């Protein structure tokens, strides 16, 4: 069987004993790499400052080579903090108002993709199957093709693909579309993302379906499908079932004084809709004054991308929303919202999910949202909590036992909170069972295997590739 070569912005390195870091994606991809041996390449996490990044660092473990490249500060500012996180991330999450387009940053993005291609080519063997991850590396396959690489290349997008009306606002729209079409297989989180991608091709006359699962785009063939990412379902269920002795969970339970817990867990990111969630909880409290002291929201939100100004700004906004609600509704012995920026271990997260009667997952837009799935997997089968889920999370396409809400509709979310808190046990069990059955059969190992099977069977048409050199 051919080797697997994975390329992603960051590489989750294993510890000395070869155990991958926690996180479904890292565990599943490590398992796939171990099977036939392979390479995982990406940025080392280090900056060389003003200096040009030199060679690669390679770590060998368990038939896997971890190949890491440093980046200069200019690379990081332009490729990572700049074009990837201030242009592609907001546009792909339909936030044109937050996109800060700068030509120099775009140039840096393509430069780093060329650097990755230059460094990867000498490591490749003819039968290797290459799997590229996410929006940081959309042009990589095209750069590899320009360097004569004819291996199978697949791409998986972890974030949403926006509709054509939004994406056309991106000045390098066509180059990004061509970059995606340079792969043999393109995977999205949901059928909505796939439809949006095909809509972009059709709108410009660049391509369309030629057979089920098979597109003609820019005069070449490319396979495309939805591969909804899963979690380590059994692991979460197991961790959540034995949280005895976990201090944080026990302390939390005791400190609730009998009030019902609702939980939100998100990277502090504007796409996650944290402010809208807090507003909806406030509306619920205003409408239901008798519930004062009877329900508490725990919002866990570790800081993320604090080098990007839009993120710093929203961190301040979330704090002020929490302060406002706690000031207006809190009492001496009850704080409605507990807001923490800590990173938690997986056993603690699983324990807190299980303790919570309601999981509030209300992003304004999200590729999938693993927290929604983790919350479901962590529930007590004999007394499960209720998931309140944004219809704009990819997870809403699968988790049909959740109460679906529109996060822009504060009234509706407030009503959903009330409904979730008072839902009878038989309805909770019925809704949870449906979702858990799905998560058990569609876990992250299933996702990884399904994508790689599709990639290994995707007919290769890289000879017909039209290379656009405008980047
Ligand atoms: P993210 O935007 O990072 O991922 P998400 O899918 O919710 O979002 O995953 C977050 C992960 O971080 C979860 O596994 C969660 O448990 C963990 N986490 C969050 N807060 C934590 C904390 N305080 N301590 C410890 N762990 C914490 C991107 C896309 C998503 C897509 C994933 C996977 O934006 O839409 O679901 O990739 O494809």
Image (spheres, rainbow, N blue to C red):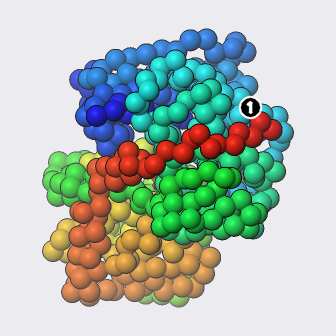
How many circles with numbers are drawn on the protein? 1
Residue placed furthest toward the right: 103
Quadrant for the C terminus in the image: top right
Residue 64 x %, y %: 33, 25
Residue placed furthest toward the front: 463
Q: Residue 324 lies in what quarter of the image?
A: bottom right
> Between 433 and 170, which is closer to the camera in this rendering?
170
Give the residue drawn at x 51%, y 75%.
391
> Between 215 and 92, which is closer to the camera in this rendering?
215
> Relative to 60, is 384 on the left or the right?
left
Give the residue drawn at x 17%, y 48%.
245
Q: Which residue is mark 1?
A: 108
Residue 186 x %, y %: 52, 52
Give the residue drawn at x 17%, y 54%.
238
Residue 362 x %, y %: 51, 69
> Relative to 138, is 61 on the left or the right?
left
- The reply to whether the residue tagged 1 has its Cβ within 8 angstroms of ligand 1 is no
Residue 348 x %, y %: 29, 50
Quadrant for the N terminus in the image: top left
Task: Provide the secondary structure element on which disc 1 rests.
Answer: helix
Give the residue drawn at x 35%, y 30%.
3
Q: Residue 441 lies in what quarter of the image?
A: bottom left
Q: Residue 207 lies in what quarter of the image?
A: bottom right
Is residue 231 visible in the rendered image? The answer is no
> Between 163 and 313, which is closer to the camera in this rendering?
163
Q: Is residue 455 above or below residue 204?
A: above
Is residue 433 visible in the rendered image? The answer is yes
Crowding at dot 1, Cα within 10 Å, few <14 / some 14-19 / many 20+, comes out as many
> Relative to 67, is 315 on the left or the right?
right
């Amino acid at each position: 069987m051919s080797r697997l070569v994975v390329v992603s912005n960051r590489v989750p390195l294993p510890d000395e004993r070869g155990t991958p870091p926690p996180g479904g994606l890292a565990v599943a991809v490590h398992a796939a790499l171990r099977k036939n041996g392979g390479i995982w390449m990406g940025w080392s996490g280090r900056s060389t400052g003003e200096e040009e990044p030199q060679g690669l660092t390679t770590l060998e473990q368990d038939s896997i080579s971890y190949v890491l490249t440093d980046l200069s500060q200019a690379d990081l500012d332009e490729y990572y903090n700049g074009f990837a996180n201030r242009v592609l991330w907001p546009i792909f999450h339909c936030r044109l108002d937050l996109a800060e387009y700068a030509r120099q940053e775009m140039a840096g993005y393509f430069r780093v993709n060329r650097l990755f291609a230059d460094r990867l080519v000498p490591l490749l063997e003819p039968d290797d199957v290459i799997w590229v991850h996410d929006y940081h590396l959309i042009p990589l396959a095209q750069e590899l093709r320009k360097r004569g690489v004819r291996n199978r290349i697949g791409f998986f997008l972890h974030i949403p693909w926006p509709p054509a009306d939004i994406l056309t606002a991106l000045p390098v729209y066509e180059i990004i579309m061509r970059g995606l079409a340079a792969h043999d297989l393109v995977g999205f989180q949901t059928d909505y993302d796939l439809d949006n991608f095909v809509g972009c091709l059709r709108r410009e006359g660049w391509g369309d379906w030629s057979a089920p699962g098979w597109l003609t785009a820019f005069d070449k063939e490319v396979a495309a499908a939805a591969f909804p990412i899963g979690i380590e379902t059994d692991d979460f269920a197991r961790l959540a079932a034995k949280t005895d002795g976990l201090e944080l969970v026990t302390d939390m339970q005791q400190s609730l004084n009998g009030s019902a817990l609702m939980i939100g867990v998100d990277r502090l990111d504007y796409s996650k809709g944290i402010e809208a969630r807090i507003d909806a909880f406030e509306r619920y409290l205003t409408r239901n004054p008798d519930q004062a002291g009877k329900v508490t929201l725990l919002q866990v939100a570790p800081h993320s991308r604090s080098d990007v100004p839009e993120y710093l700004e929203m961190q301040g906004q979330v704090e002020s929303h929490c302060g406002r609600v706690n000031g207006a509704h809190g009492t001496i012995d009850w704080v409605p919202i507990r807001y923490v920026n800590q990173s938690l271990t997986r056993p603690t997260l699983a324990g807190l999910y299980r303790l919570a009667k309601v999981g509030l997952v209300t992003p304004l837009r999200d590729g999938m949202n693993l927290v929604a799935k983790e919350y479901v997997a962590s529930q007590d089968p004999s007394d499960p909590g209720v998931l309140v889920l944004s219809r704009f999370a990819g997870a809403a396409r699968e988790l049909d036992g959740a109460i679906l809400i529109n996060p822009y509709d504060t009234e509706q979310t407030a009503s959903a909170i009330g409904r979730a808190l008072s839902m009878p046990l038989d309805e909770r069990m019925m809704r949870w069972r449906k979702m858990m059955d799905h998560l058990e059969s569609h876990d992250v190992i299933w996702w990884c295997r399904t994508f790689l099977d599709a990639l290994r069977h995707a007919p290769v048409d890289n000879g017909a590739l039209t290379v656009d050199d405008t980047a």
